[in-house]
Image: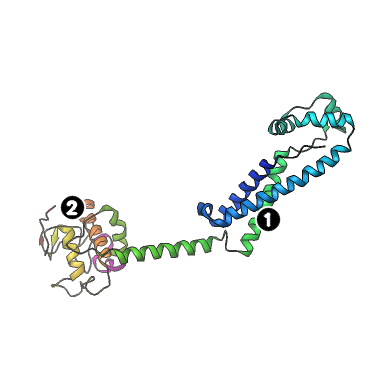
Amino acid sequence: MKQRSPVYVTIAIILVILFIMYYMFVQNSSFLSSPYFWGTAVISAILALIQNAIGDLIENEKFKSLTDAQKAEYLQSKKIPYFKGLYESAFKKQTASTEQDLLIDHGFDGIMELDNQLPKWWLGLFYFGVAYCAVYMISFFLTDFAHQGTEYDAEYKAQTASIAEYVKNTPPPTIDNAVYSPDNIAAGQEVFKTNCVSCHGDGGKGGIGPNLTDQAWINQPEKTLFKNVFHMVENGSPNNPTMQAWGKNGVLTGFDIQNVAAYVYHINQEQNPITPAQGGAAPQGTPANWEK
């Protein structure tokens, strides 16, 4: 008779499979605190114990039908630890007599073929892969699991709600508390492309509106360049009605104005600190001596 796997090995395998299946569907380890997971684990363990007990009864009945020599051989094999026996059955080289019994009646180039069984670890991995594939395919076609579109929509909604919650609980910057940050330059560039490039040109070189890369400014209501840009975008220009009050009329939020002010500060003070961008419009206004 072949030795059966100990019940603790069976239970361990069941728990590993349950962990993988729950994690596959939940996508995180929160299920470890769920009573459904532990309930399933306990029921599975009880069924494994029942199956093992039934196996013991069947094994006892088969043992009675063995000859004395077979009984002695079986009892001797029972003394070998389970994992040691498993290792030997998978990796131990067979004896010459065993190989002689397994020889197949053909060969090639002096190499004879043996009718060996596949290792148990290989068969176990193969059947597990087949079962996993079946569960995955069923889940893919009959549930929302593993659908990238569905996962993307869920994450997009969660992120949108998170941003809305942040905006709701975080007052938008004002000219009094707005600060320059390099992290806002990229977002400010997008705001500039959407709302400002038609007048001030690509990269702020000027067009209908003045060049924003030189050091001459028509309006200078604030002492620092960053605050000055914030003021002009929020309130508009008293000298040119085309420069609307983007903040006052609600087109741009305080966050948008802070970002675009960072972008203009960047192209004026960091990208073109001395010489205006090449190909830009002629300076307008008077030289500005901004405070740092």
Residue 28 visible from this viewpoint? no
Of tags 2 and 1, the one toward the viewer is 1
- The range drawn in magenta is 194-208
Q: Is residue 108 left or right of residue 197?
A: right
Against 40, is 243 above or below?
below
| Prevalent SS, magenta region | helix
Element assignment for label 2: loop
Cα gap from disc 2 to disc 1, whole angstroms = 67 Å
Q: Nearer the viewer, residue 174 or 233?
A: 174
Q: Which mark is residue 275?
A: 2
Residue placed under numbered mark 1 in the picture: 134
Residue type for callout 1: Ala
In percent of the image, x 82 and y 44: which residue is there? 58
Indicate the position of residue 270 as horizontal and vertical percent values. 22, 51
Indicate the position of residue 163 as horizontal and vertical percent values. 36, 63
Residue 114 visible from this viewpoint? yes
Label 2 CA crowd tier, 10 Å (few <14, some 14–19, many 20+): few
> Furthest-top residue in view?
96
**Magenta includes 196?**
yes
Element assignment for label 1: helix
Q: Nearer the viewer, residue 289 or 102?
A: 102
Against 52, is 40 above or below?
below
